[in-house]
Image: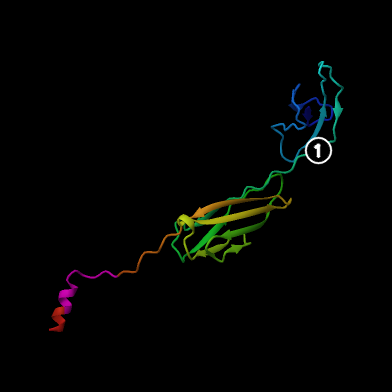
Amino acid sequence: MQISLKSGFSSLVADSGKVSSSSGTYAPAGLGYAKRYYWRVKVWDANSWSSRWTKGPVFTTKAKHPDPDFTWSPTHPALNTQVRFTDRSSAYGGAAISSWTWSFEQGNPASSTLQHPATTFTQQGQNKQNAVTLSATDTKGNSCSATKSVAPSIPLPQWEEISPLSWIQKILQLL
């Protein structure tokens, strides 16, 4: 099988050569995203006699799916503290990200469709990690998801600093 970007096959992208296989499939590596390809096939018999080249229908590979990515602040949040998420997703082939679907494990709210949402983690998830998933969809209808773990900590207790001699002062006041 030969695959080319040109109908005359002057510039080959893939050439399998003669393959001894009973499989009816061939998956070439190195094809680009959103490109139009021409292909042809030749077969050999048991005596190594080959057929003529037979062209197949032209095909176009799919566009590259978006690459969902995000950050959050604060990076080490405490429980019941608002966490803001910043979308850093990328789209390819002239597309743009057109929609966002977020889910927040143990978050309030538990989901969002905003580009840059916020949530408050009310409990720690499994292994003290809370899964956050972003599914990004581009203007060509391609989508992809990414999940990261946020580890909210238990907030520090409230405390009040007092003088080491304050108990003596209280006793003297009572006298």
Mark 1 Cα-neighbour bin, 10 Å: few <14, some 14–19, many ≥20: few
Quadrant of residue 128 within the rendered picture: bottom left
In the rendered structure, the answer to whether residue 114 lies left or right of residue 159 reads: right
Which of these two is toward me, 55 or 161? 55
| Residue stretch rendered in magenta on the structure | 160-170
Residue 47 to residue 28: above or below: above
Quadrant of residue 117 within the rendered picture: bottom right
At horizontal 71% and vertical 36% (from top left) the residue drawn is 32
Q: Which residue lies most toward the bottom here? A: 175
Which of these two is toward me, 12 or 133? 133
At horizontal 34% and vertical 69% (from top left) the residue drawn is 158
Residue 69 position in % (x across, y down): 58, 50
At horizontal 72% and vertical 33% (from top left) the residue drawn is 27
**Type of residue at label 1?**
Phe
List the residue tagged with mark 1.
Answer: 59
In the rendered structure, the answer to whether residue 105 lies left or right of residue 49 reads: left
SS state under label 1: strand
